[in-house]
Image (cartoon, rainbow, N blue to C red):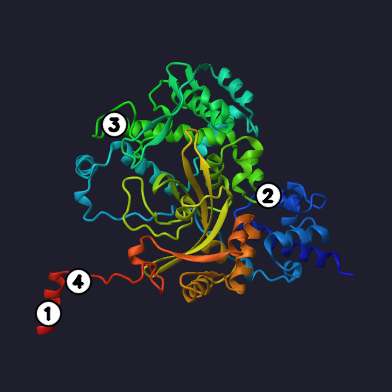
C-alpha cells in the first residue's frame, strides 16, 4: 500500500498535469466542471473540489479520472507517471489574427497626413465613409479577439447574468431603464441601390431621443430578432444616454451599409460615430442576451451546435457571432454572406483571408469555400467542412460549419463560423504541418478533394473532443477540400479552372534581366 507521502506526491503531479492541460486549452475551473458534467453528471466535481485536485489536496475517484482523461484525450495512466515534460506547452498569447503593414518611412504618415489622404482615397475609389468605418471597427475587433470586457460588464450590470432572457424580460428591462415602446407596421420593400439585385429591406426599429423605441410589428414573428433589437436599444440608453445619434436598425437592402439618413457619397465624422455606436450597441446586446459564463456553458453542453438558438429563442446569427467572444479557444472566424457573393459581417480572429468582400464583387472567387458552396445549395441543414487553405508557401487548416437562413426581411443568406485547427493540434503535441501535409496530399491525389487519411482524421477527432466542438468531428468524417483566396491562383495540382494562368513578366522586368545577363 502506498505511503501517505507517496500519495501526496502522486496527487501533486496529477493536479499539476490537470491544471496545465486546462490552462493550455483556455478552460476555467467552471468550464472543466461543466465538461465533466456533460460526460457523467454523477461523477462531475464542483469547482472547489477541482481546485483542491489541482492543488494536490485531493485525489479524484477512478470514475472522475476516466472522465477527465476522456475530456483531454489522454490515457488515465499518463496522469500518474510523474513526468511533466509533455505538459510544458504554454497557451499562445491572444494577439490579433490579421497582420498589419508597417508604414515606412514613418515621418510621411502622421495623423494629419492620413486624415488628408484617407478621404481622398475613399473619394477616388468610390468607397463610402460607412464602409471605411466598418473596416476600422473590424480591425479593432480582430486586434482584440472580439473580446471587450467593459461592454460585457456594462451588459451584465443590467441583465444580472440572467440566461436565457424571454421577450417579457426584455420589455421589463426596457421599462426599468426608462424606455417607452411604440409600435409601427411596415412590411418589407424592394431596394436595389448598390446591390447587384434588388433585396427585400425591412426597417426593424429605431430610437427616438430621448426615451422612445419604435418597433416594427413584423418582428413579432421573429422572437430572436425582437429580443436583439430591444437589447440593442437598451444598450443605446445605457451607453450613450439615449441621445438618438445612431442608425436605424435595418435588414437587407444596401450592401455597402451606407447610412440611410444621408445620400452624401463623401465621408464625414458621423459615419465613424454611427458605425462605432452600432458596433458597441450590437456587442452589448449580444452580451446581455448571452452573458459570458452561462452562455459559454450553454454552448459547451451542446458542443457548439449552430442551431441551438432555437432552444432559447436567439437567432443563429447571434449564436454564431457570440461564439468567438466567449469560447475558450481564440482562433475563430465568421462570415455572413448574401448571394451572389457579398459579406455583410466579417470577423477574422484567426487570419483567414476573405473569399470576397463587401466593397465589390471579385471576378474569380474560389468556388470551393464552404460558404460559397452553401450559397448555391438548397439545403437548410448545417454543413461542416475541413479545408486546407493554400496561399503561396503558407498552408493552413480550417474547419467551419455553414447554415442557410432567412433574415427578417425574407432574404436568403449563409452564416458561417469556423476555427483555425493548427493551434489546437500544436497545443495537443501534434505536428500541425504534418497533418496539413497529409490532408493536402490526399486531396491533390483526388483532384482537390478527398477523404481525410485515417491518422490525420484520428487527431482531428481528438481535437474535436478536447475543444468540445462537435462539427469538427462531423467535418473530419467528410471529404476535405483545398481552397485558396482566388481561383486564378489555384494551388491544386489539377487546377480547378483547367490550367493555371502563367504569370506575365512585365516588359521592364525583361529589360532588367537582359541588362544583367550582358554584364
Q: Residue at x 58, y 64 (%)?
A: 478
* Label whose residue precedes the other's in the sequence (2 or 1): 2
Q: Which mark is residue 213?
A: none
Q: Residue at x 58, y 61 (%)?
A: 475
Q: Residue at x 21, y 44 (%)?
A: 121
Where is mark 2, residue-wise?
A: 29
Which mark is nearer the camera, 2 or 4? 4
Q: Which mark is residue 505?
A: 4
Q: Which mark is residue 269?
A: 3
Residue 126 drawn above or below residue 270: below
Which mark is nearer the camera, 3 or 4? 4
Mark-to-mark CA distance, 3 and 4:
44 Å
Query: Are the residues at dot 2 and dot 4 in contact (C-beta closer than 8 Å)?
Result: no
* Label whose residue precedes the other's in the sequence (3 or 4): 3
Residue 122 drawn above or below residue 67: above
Where is mark 1, residue-wise?
A: 514
Mark-to-mark CA distance, 4 and 1:
13 Å
Amino acid at each position: 500500500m502506498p505511503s501517505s507521502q507517496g500519495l501526496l506526491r502522486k496527487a501533486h503531479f496529477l493536479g499539476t498535469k490537470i491544471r496545465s492541460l486546462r490552462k493550455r486549452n483556455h478552460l476555467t475551473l467552471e468550464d472543466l466542471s461543466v465538461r465533466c458534467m456533460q460526460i457523467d453528471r454523477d461523477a462531475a466535481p464542483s469547482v472547489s473540489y477541482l481546485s483542491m485536485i489541482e492543488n494536490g489536496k485531493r485525489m479524484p475517484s477512478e470514475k472522475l479520472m476516466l472522465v477527465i482523461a476522456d475530456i483531454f484525450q489522454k490515457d488515465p495512466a499518463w496522469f500518474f507517471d510523474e513526468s511533466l515534460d509533455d505538459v510544458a506547452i504554454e497557451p499562445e498569447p491572444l494577439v490579433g489574427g490579421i497582420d498589419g503593414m508597417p508604414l515606412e518611412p514613418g515621418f510621411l504618415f502622421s495623423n494629419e497626413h492620413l486624415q488628408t489622404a484617407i478621404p481622398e482615397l475613399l473619394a477616388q475609389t468610390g468607397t463610402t465613409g460607412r464602409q471605411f468605418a466598418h473596416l476600422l471597427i473590424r480591425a479593432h475587433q480582430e486586434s482584440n479577439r472580439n473580446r471587450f470586457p467593459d461592454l460585457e460588464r456594462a451588459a451584465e450590470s443590467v441583465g444580472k447574468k440572467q440566461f436565457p432572457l424571454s421577450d417579457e424580460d426584455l420589455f421589463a428591462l426596457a421599462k426599468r431603464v426608462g424606455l417607452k415602446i411604440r409600435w409601427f407596421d411596415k412590411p418589407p420593400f424592394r431596394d436595389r441601390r448598390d446591390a447587384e439585385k434588388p433585396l427585400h429591406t425591412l426597417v426593424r426599429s429605431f430610437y427616438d431621443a430621448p426615451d422612445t423605441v419604435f418597433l416594427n410589428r413584423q418582428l413579432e414573428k421573429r422572437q430572436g430578432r425582437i429580443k436583439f433589437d430591444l437589447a440593442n436599444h437598451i444598450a443605446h440608453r445605457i451607453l450613450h444616454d439615449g441621445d438618438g445619434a445612431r442608425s436605424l436598425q435595418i435588414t437587407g437592402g444596401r450592401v455597402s451599409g451606407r447610412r440611410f439618413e444621408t445620400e452624401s457619397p463623401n465621408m464625414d465624422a458621423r459615419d465613424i460615430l454611427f458605425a462605432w455606436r452600432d458596433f458597441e450597441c450590437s456587442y452589448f446586446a449580444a452580451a446581455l442576451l448571452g452573458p459570458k459564463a452561462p452562455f459559454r456553458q450553454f454552448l459547451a453542453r451542446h458542443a457548439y451546435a449552430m442551431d441551438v438558438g432555437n432552444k432559447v429563442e436567439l437567432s443563429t446569427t447571434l449564436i454564431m457571432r457570440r461564439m468567438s467572444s466567449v469560447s475558450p479557444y481564440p482562433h475563430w472566424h465568421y462570415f455572413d454572406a448574401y448571394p451572389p457573393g457579398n459579406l455583410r459581417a466579417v470577423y477574422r480572429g484567426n487570419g483567414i483571408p476573405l473569399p470576397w468582400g463587401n466593397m465589390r464583387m471579385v471576378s474569380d472567387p474560389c468556388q470551393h469555400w464552404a460558404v460559397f458552396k452553401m450559397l448555391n445549395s438548397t439545403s437548410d441543414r448545417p454543413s461542416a467542412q475541413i479545408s486546407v487553405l493554400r496561399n503561396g508557401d503558407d498552408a493552413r487548416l480550417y474547419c467551419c460549419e455553414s447554415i442557410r437562413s432567412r433574415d427578417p426581411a425574407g432574404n436568403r443568406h449563409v452564416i458561417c463560423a469556423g476555427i483555425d485547427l493548427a493551434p489546437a493540434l500544436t497545443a495537443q503535441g501534434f505536428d500541425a504541418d504534418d497533418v496539413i501535409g497529409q490532408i493536402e496530399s490526399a486531396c491533390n491525389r483526388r483532384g482537390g478533394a478527398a477523404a481525410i487519411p485515417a491518422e490525420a482524421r484520428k487527431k482531428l477527432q481528438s481535437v474535436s473532443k478536447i475543444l468540445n466542438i462537435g462539427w469538427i468531428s462531423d467535418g473530419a468524417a467528410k471529404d476535405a477540400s483545398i481552397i485558396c483566396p482566388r481561383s486564378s491562383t489555384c494551388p491544386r495540382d489539377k487546377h480547378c479552372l483547367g490550367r493555371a494562368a502563367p504569370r506575365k513578366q512585365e516588359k521592364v522586368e525583361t529589360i532588367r534581366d537582359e541588362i544583367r545577363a550582358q554584364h
